[in-house]
Structure formats: C-alpha cells, structure tokens
Amino acid sequence: MDSSEVTLLQFAPFESRVDTGFWHKLGSYKLNVLKLDEDAQVIHGYYRNDNAEALSCGFNVDYEAFNSKLNQHPNHFYCTGHLFVKNTVETFKDCDKLELLNRAGIQLWEDIKSGRSIENPYLLTQFLALTFTDLKKYQYYYWFAFPVVKPVEDFRATPSKPIDSLLSNAQIESLLSEYVTVFKNLGMPFFLLKKIDGQSVKLGCLKEWGDFFDEVEIPTVVMCDPSTLHTNPGWPLRNLLILIGTHWKKSGDRVQIICLRDKTREGARSISHSITFTVFIPKILNKLQDIPAFIGWEKNKRQKLGPRMINLSSSLDPTKLSESAVDLNLKLMRWRLMPSLDLEKIAQTKCLLLGAGTLGCNVARCLMGWGIRNISFIDNGKVSYSNPVRQTLYYFDDSIGGGRPKAETASLRLKQINPSINSTGYSISIPMPGHSVSPQDNNVKQDIEKLEQLISCHDAIFLLMDTRESRWLPTVIAKAKNKVIVINAALGFDTFLVMRHGANKGDHSRQQFAVDDSQFEDSSAIIPGADLGCYFCNDVVAPGNSTYDRTLDQQCTVSRPGVSMIASALAVELLISVLQHPFGQYAPAETGIAHPDVSSSSLSPLGLVPHQILESYLQDGFSFLLKAFNSPTYLEDLTGLTKMHEECRTDDIWDLSDAEEEITRQVED
Amino acid sequence: MDSSEVTLLQFAPFESRVDTGFWHKLGSYKLNVLKLDEDAQVIHGYYRNDNAEALSCGFNVDYEAFNSKLNQHPNHFYCTGHLFVKNTVETFKDCDKLELLNRAGIQLWEDIKSGRSIENPYLLTQFLALTFTDLKKYQYYYWFAFPVVKPVEDFRATPSKPIDSLLSNAQIESLLSEYVTVFKNLGMPFFLLKKIDGQSVKLGCLKEWGDFFDEVEIPTVVMCDPSTLHTNPGWPLRNLLILIGTHWKKSGDRVQIICLRDKTREGARSISHSITFTVFIPKILNKLQDIPAFIGWEKNKRQKLGPRMINLSSSLDPTKLSESAVDLNLKLMRWRLMPSLDLEKIAQTKCLLLGAGTLGCNVARCLMGWGIRNISFIDNGKVSYSNPVRQTLYYFDDSIGGGRPKAETASLRLKQINPSINSTGYSISIPMPGHSVSPQDNNVKQDIEKLEQLISCHDAIFLLMDTRESRWLPTVIAKAKNKVIVINAALGFDTFLVMRHGANKGDHSRQQFAVDDSQFEDSSAIIPGADLGCYFCNDVVAPGNSTYDRTLDQQCTVSRPGVSMIASALAVELLISVLQHPFGQYAPAETGIAHPDVSSSSLSPLGLVPHQILESYLQDGFSFLLKAFNSPTYLEDLTGLTKMHEECRTDDIWDLSDAEEEITRQVED
C-alpha cells in the first residue's frame, strides 16, 4: 500500500429528518403528559443503509419515536436518543449546549471504555434532540446532536474503493446472504467479517473480536452505512473506530472497513455499490486518564451550528388545527392550575339549551370555550332586529325579512366557530301553563314528546328562556329523568339568578352520595344534591301566562347588557363545577348557613321538591300536562297552594264582546 | 216636493288613513316621552273635500299629528282627536270602547248644547284613536272612532241632486269665489249660503245664522264634504244637522244642504260636481233632558267593528329597523327602572379598545348592547385557530391561512351585527417596556403617534391586552390627556381585575368635583376620581417583558372561559356607571373602608399616581419612551424603585455564542 495515498478521512454527518407525525406526537405529549417537565425523555430514531444516492445521510425521527417497542424493519437501524422539551424559547436558547453534549459524550465514553458498547453497539450511535414547541403557532424549534468522540489525532485512511476490490463476487453474495439470514432480525449495525475461501465469508459480532481474527491479519469490520457518498463513510463509523482503538487496536493500526450499502433493485437486494477503506486508528487521548472531547451538534440549513424550525400550520388540515388549538387552552389548565381537571368528561357532556336568546347564545359560547362538543338548541323564535347586538350568535342579516329561526341559526353559527362542534337546532314550542292547548292539538303532543326525548339524550339542560312558565315543563320532565343536570338562569334588570335544580333521587341510593358531615364544621349548611329544590320550589304562585297584560318593558327582559354575560358565564361555570365533583349532580351544596330542615328533608312537610307534580306527570303524562296548560288554577289546586290569582282567559284580540257589537250595530244607521 | 221621494239619509263613514310616518312618530313618542302613560294625548288629523272619485271618505293622520301648529292647507280640514296608547294588548282589548265613545260623545253633546260648536265648528268633528304599539314587532293595532250623536229618529232627505239644480252657474262661480277668498284661510268646514241674485251668493259663518236667514226660507248650509259618493254626504254632516236641530230648527224642519266638493282640474278649481239635498231635521231626543246615544267606532277591513293592525317591519329599511330596535331595549329601561338614564350620552361615547381578544370581543359586544355607536380596536394580532371559541367576534374561517387581522376583522363584525356602528380596526403594535426598540425605528414612532392621536379622539379607552407591559404606554398617554376615561380589565385563571384609572386632574379645578363628605358616614372611604391610581400604582416592579422566559401556560392567558365574560361585562358596566355619574370620570370611588391617606393624597409621598412618569413623558416624549422600551431598569430607576430584577438582553435565537461555535468548529473534522 502506498502510504502517500493515505488522506484525511471525513465522515458524512447525519442530517435529522423529523417527520410531521413526530411533531404532532410531541405536541400532544407535551400538552397532555409532559406539561412543564423539562427532564430528558427517551425517544427512538433510525438511520438506514439503503438511502437513494442523491439523499444525504438522514437520521429519521417519526411518529413512532415515543414507542419503546420498535418495528424492526430491515435496513432500519434504531438508536436511542434523549429528547429535551424546553418550556420557553429563552430556556431553549440559553440552554448550555456544550454541557449537554459533554454529558452525553461522557456517557458514551463510559460505554466505550466499559465495553457496554461491544455488547450493545447501538450505544455508539445515540442522539440528543433539544426542542421548543410553540403549540399556539405550530412552530417547532429543534436541534439534534449525534455525539462522537473527537480523538486527538485526525482519522486517516486510504481512498475508498468499491467492495469488489476487496471481495470476489461470490464473497459479496455470501456477505449479503449471511447478513440477511444471520443479522437481519438483530438489525446489527456493525459486524466482523472473515474470508473463508474465495467463495464465502463468515460474519461475527463485535464481542467475538478476540476469537474471530488472527493476531497478524488486518481485521475487516462491516458498518451498515447511511452515507451514499462514494468517498466518505457515514457518521456511525467514528465511534466504531474509537471503540476498536480503545479495545483491540492501537494508534496507527490498520482496520479494513466495509461500508455496507444496501439497495433493492428490480426486486433483488444488492450490496455491490458498497465501498471499502483501510483506516488508520488515530491516537484517541494524549494521556490515558484524559477524557476526550466530544462533537456532534448538527448544522442547520444555513450551514451554521444552530437550531432548525418548522412551521406546520400551513401544512395541516385547518379543521384539525382548530380542534387541537381549542383543546390547547384547556389542556394548559392542567399543567399547573388544575392538574386533576377531567377535560374529557367535560368534552363529552351533551348540553341542551332551552332558549337561544342572550343567555342561550352566551352559554353556548362559554360551553364551547370549555371544549364541549355537543350543544343543542330549542327555540321557536326568529331573529328580530333588536337581537344581534345582545344575542351573540346572530347578525343583522339574520333579522331581515322576518328573521331566521333562532335555534337553527345558533346551531349553524357554532359550527362556523368550531367545525368540530356537533350541534342541532330545534324550532319547538315549549307548552306553558296558562297558555291554552287543545287536547286535539297533535303539534303540542309531538313537541312534548320531542322535548322529552331531547332531554333524555342530553346530560345537562340549561333553562334560558325569557318567561317563568316556559321553564315549568322542562323542569318537570328533567326532574323525572335520571342523570340530567338542570342549570337555570334568569335575568332581571341588574340582577340575575343562576341555580342548579335538585337531582332526581331515582335509582341512586342515598347512601352512595351521602355527605360526609365530619368534613364540614356545620353539617346543617350542607344540602345533598338530590335534596336541592327547583326554580318553582317555595313559590306561592303557580306558573301562568306571565306576558299576559304586561307592558313592553315588562314583556321584554329589560336588562343591563352585562348581566346576561355574567349570568351565562356563571351558569356554565356552575355546570363545570358540578361535572368535576365526584358525585356529579349529586354533589352537595354548601350554603354557608345552617338549614335546620335539610338534613332530614324527606321528613319536611313540603320537602324541597314538589313531589305531587312529579307523580302526576309520571302517572298521567300528556293529559296531566294539558290540564296544567289550560287551567290556570290546576297547578295551584294540585300543589295545594291556596293563594289563587284570578286570571282571565285569553279572548281573541279581534273580537269585541257580542253585546258590545250588537249595541253598536243597532245604533248605526 | 214629492214627499214620497224622501228616503233614509245615509252618511259615508270616515275611513282612517294612517300614514307610516305617524306610526314612526308614535313609536318614538311612546318610547321616549309617553313610556307607560296611558292618558289621552291630543293629536290632529284631517279630512279633505277634494278626494278623487274612487276614494273612500278618508280621515288622515300623518307624521304631523303631534304638532299643534298645523300647516293650513286648502281643502284640508283639521280636527282634534284624542289618542290613547295602551301598554298591553290586553288593556287595548279589554278597554271599554262604549264608555270611551260615550265620554267623547257627552263632551260633543255639551259642545253642541252650549253653542261652543257654533263658535268652533271643528268641535263637531273630533276623533278618538285607541292604539297599542308592539314596538318589538313593528305591529301597530289601532281603532278610530268619529263620535256622532245618534238621534232618536232617522235622518231623512230628498235624493241628492247636482248643485246646478239649486244654483245657476254664475252662482256656483260666486260660491267658489267667496269660499276661496273669504273662507280659505279659515279652513271653515261648514258655512251658510244665501242667494243674492241670479249671479251671486253670500256666505256666512254658523254663528251668523240668526241674522243671515229669513224666518220663512229654507236655510241653505254648505258642508265641505269628504264624501265622493253621488248619493251620500260625508260623516261630518251628521253632527252639523244635530247642531242645527238643537239651536235653530225643530224636528221635521227642512234644511238645504250643499255638499261642497272641490277639485282642481287642468289648473282650475271646480266645485260643479258638488251635490245638494233637502234634509229633514230628525227628532234628536225623546225628552229634552235626555242624553243622546253616540256611535262612531270604525269598522275594520273585514267590515266588522274591530281594530286594524299594520305591520311595518317589511316596509321599513332594515338598517333603520335595526337601529331603532337596538334602541328599544335601552329606552325601555327609562320607562320604570332608570328614568334618568342618559342614553344619548352613552350612545355618543367613543370607545377605543386596546386588544381584540377575548376581552376585546366581549367588551365590544357589551358596548353595542348599551347602544354605543363608536368603537375602535387596536390589535396587531391575527386570528389563530384557538381564538374563535373564546373570542366572540371571530369564526373558524378567520383563522385559516395565517389568520385575518384581528382589529379589522372585529371591526367588520361589529358592522355586520349592527350596520349603524361606526367602527375601525387598527393593526398597530403597542411598544412595551422591556421590548427593545431602535431609535431609528420609524414604525414605532409612527405607532406611538397614531396611538396618541387615537387616544385623544376617543372618550374612553379600554385596556384589554394580554400582557402587563403593553398596558403601560396607553396608561401613560391617557393619563396625560384630559377627558379620557381609562377602564382596565385583566384575567387570571379564575380571577380577574376590572378597574378604572384615576382621571387627569388637568385643568379641572379640584373644587368643582370635590366630594361632599357629609353625605357619607365615613368620609375617608371616599376617593375623588382624580386621586384614583392606575394599574401600575403600588407596583414594586416596573413593567418589563413578561412573556420572556415564560412557559406556554404562563404566556397564554389560561383562564376559565366564563371569567372573560364576567370581566368584560363588569368593565362595560363600570364605564356606563362612570358616564352616568354627574362628575363623569371625576366621580369619587366609594371604597367602603377607610383610607387614611386618600383625603390628602397629594401630600402622600408616592401619591396614588406616578407623577414622575407623567412628567417625563410630557417633557421628553418619544425619547423618554425609547428609554423605557429599551432599558429594563430605566423605569425602575426613574420611579425610584430599588428592587431591580436582573433581566438579560434578548439574544438572537439562532446564534450560539461565538466561543461555542469556535470550539465546535475546531473539533470537527
């Protein structure tokens, strides 16, 4: 060998190739698992030795990176890495990269010295990934390092030659065959090679070195090579040479290296484009006890040492982006403020909003803010000109020409705000006590059936209507159903009411949700969820036609505009609080003041729930409801309320009394 | 005269013709003036005697109805009426129409008997208008009555004849000429006529009756006739005949009536289509002391006695409808709840919202609810995917492709909600302390100038940004301006801050807005508006870059969704309360607790306002601001705060330190 031919050996560095799938996994992992944790996370990446010629020496990290059981693909060489997810761009920037690399390098050096890398050659090819994820902007900053020992002398080698300069074609076939059958399933990146005869070769693991080679011969070592350059081997060879120089060879010794490059051409695997070098082992350290230097931070696309950034926002499906963005704000709550927050439970809660006016619109918006995905509206009104400035789901255009139906329009708007929302609007009238109904009126019967069905298939209903009596029927139906949470909101001028109705005792044993009195100083201040009353409890007047004979300012809810927002927000936050309570709707109420009756409310003469109403509804159904709608006094009779208010029947606005018309007709000429 | 020719005389009844303009006037009058008042209101209407032949006997009420000074148009005969505006459809319906008519009739009868109707013949043709206005639906229910005395005998007359059967053409010309010259400007509906010779006639007022006619002749009386029927006179003749029968003629006496009908044909007035009857005065009462019966309620289009209804919503300009509908809810507040509410002052207040995020959107919506017409936004952000579910002016579509600019989009949405809104969005960056600015940066200088200018031309500014330091510059600028109210809102997770900043003492004498201590039990609990602090008062850390080195959950405002709605609503209601206070922004704050310093706050060492900041800004302007933006410690130095927090300068994220790169370069092969 002509020593003048020996030149500096340069290695093709890895170029990190991070799949979009990895960034999505990382975003989700950061948001849901890591949160503020900046500790190193173990991930996996791989290089391959069957890269196409034009490709650089890629190092791949994809959506499987967080899986510890890796799919062992032939020609994929999996390596372990440490992922650092920084919380801020500043800590990412200010992080001491030399120190990080040195820490990984020292571990590498320990693994080399101790021989652990002989047992597990993948320890020679580890990586670091320093990241910062801007989850709001879908920008991912990252910087990979592939730590290698920097020996005190340069690597030197003879120029590369084709593999067939070293091995006969038969030997090459033998190498491939041995490699495929013996090493395929191990995915071994490095191995030893010995010619047996002109036809065949024998392969061995690194740990067999001592027995494998004769003392005198130049050992031949094969590395599965990610490089496609004709003149340069890939990065993994560096630490392999250091390992050889540390354990088996001394500075200046020669090693024959085969850079094994695989390729499937017309269905057949080929390694004939592999190359080979004779490499001179460099001096690794000046003094035996020294710690070597380490290098390995990747250059970015500007060929500078620095991080890379990828912005995924434009490449993602906007609907999916929206969905994950909506979750983002919510999931951030769990990082620090409410780690136990059960967002999935909230998201799955199906909400039925009765009324799509100021309260309905604001409640729906606030529910969406909490990530609730199922929101239905019931309202038989149409958008009027005065609505859009206060009813936050409507526009001026919705009020032209008689107005669009509120329920359907509100539902459409929710989907325009968040395409992932599942929302339907129902233009149903809610029959009301004091508003007459004919027993033959099939529409009313159908409306009631639809209302019952809708209440049954939702988890929470909100009473957000503008009259007292329209809340009555849903209150009764909901109380008769199990598992429906009822939240009620009503506005005054600068006052409001937000309350939850008492839960149905139903088939839930009292004991299950019994209140542990001992945790409260004053146990009489606690009311179990099933003992809470409803909107009509304690009323001395049954619900009737409250718009009858009311002036305009009494008919419209004349209200300071801010009141609806406040009440809507509190109504939603109340639902969320109930959902987060371990007892759900059976969560006890803390009143802060002593209620002597409540601890034994079932013994109380009236109780907190109008049981007689509930029984009649359960027993007589529609015929009971008809009486309630048509007879102003029926409910008061039924419930035993004695203070009756005389209310007149509604006459047709167009007609005078017969007597009056007759008189006038008589006197007219 | 052949008595067999005498037949029942029927009168063409009035048909009320109410101009759309009247309903608008009425709606506005009801809303702004009448409110709940149901008392009779005097209005004016008119009939004309130049109706086209096909037209019924119209009685007109138009937008001038509430004006007492009436435009005296020839051929318009103005009458006074009483308008009743009922508050509810029920009181409208249940109102006793017979009683109402009788009351008017008795007055009419008194006017006839007393002779007041002779002096003022218009008293014979009064009217009633019973109305109910559904201002929300633009539906107007109305029912007119034209009260007349119903004599105990029927009116009888000879069949009608053309006027030229009674008068020669010359006499007709003479009548017209006299009528035009003598009576035109009086608009007299009835008058006396006497033939002087074959060529001419003489006219007289009703009150001249005694001297005008001979005892023996059949008196001729002219009525300006709204009827166009060939066989029937109009309604005003009825009470005229009763007047004649009461004062000058007895039952069975004959009176010659000329129904004067006017017409302008080819530029010339003509009365030749007038008709004439010989009418027999009926017996009015059975007994002298009786009170006659009265009739006069109008039939509706269904030819039944009953009200009419007009729905104007479809005929109105939707934008105008929207405008008035928005005002409706607000004006209703003044009917009962807040009669002194100055809505005009609120409507005229120009609001500048700094920040168009969750707070900005909700604040703008709430301001619109209060009828505020001028709302500007400043925000340099773009709509991101997570925004629409919480930022209530944006849709999913706004966040696609990098996002639409928030300020402009928010502004556009306001106009889509209420076309009357005057709104502009400005994508301006607000320079912040701790966020470096180059002195050569003209953009920043322009942004500051624009910000100063915008603050100057608004009455109230809202600080609704998501960082502490972005509030600093607007706080300083606004404090330096007179007459700018500053409302500040900021969110925590389940907390919020809503405050108003102290007013500029400016050129307002302290005395003018001095607090009258005597009205408060504890005067030290009152802080004059000009002595209130700002967001930065009492802080021990100057505003700096608060997003620097913050994790995602610290950078985003992680907040319960309801909190923004509550804070936004309270911020707006706070502004409204300040606007309604007689002192405006100088309104004192009631703290409810004693503050020993505040009554002498100008003597307090720090005061409640950082005066040193204000002075530097007023003195040094932009150069002062540059120092504040660029030097983290400048503000703390300036304000004498001694607790300095070491903050590092922002390095370029892309660059390692030189040393680090050099090391890495050296060691790389």
Image (tube, coloured by chain):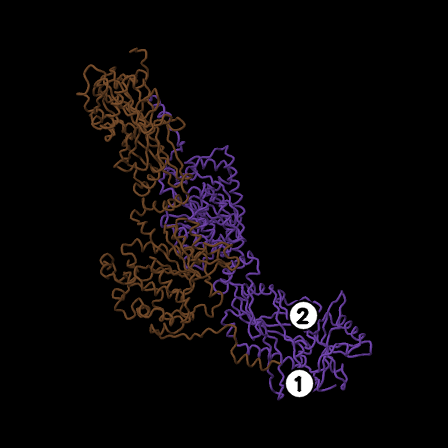
Chain colours: A purple, B brown
For the residues marked 1 and 2, what is the alpha-carbon distance in whole angstroms? Answer: 30 Å
Q: Is residue B585 left or right of residue A149?
A: left
Q: Tag on residue A54?
A: 2
SS of the residue under disc 2? loop
Q: Residue furthest left?
A: B211
Output the chain of dot 2. A
Give the percent coordinates (x, y) of residue B549.
Answer: 47, 70
Q: Quadrant of the C terminus of chain B?
A: bottom right
**Position above or below: A8 against B319:** below
Location of residue A240 by image quarter:
bottom right
Q: Amino acid at mark 1?
A: Pro
Q: Residues within 10 Å of mark 1 (few under 14, many from 20)?
A: many
Label 1 belongs to which residue?
A: A282
B189 vs B35, nearest the viewer: B189
B573 vs B62, nearest the viewer: B62
Location of residue A12 by image quarter:
bottom right
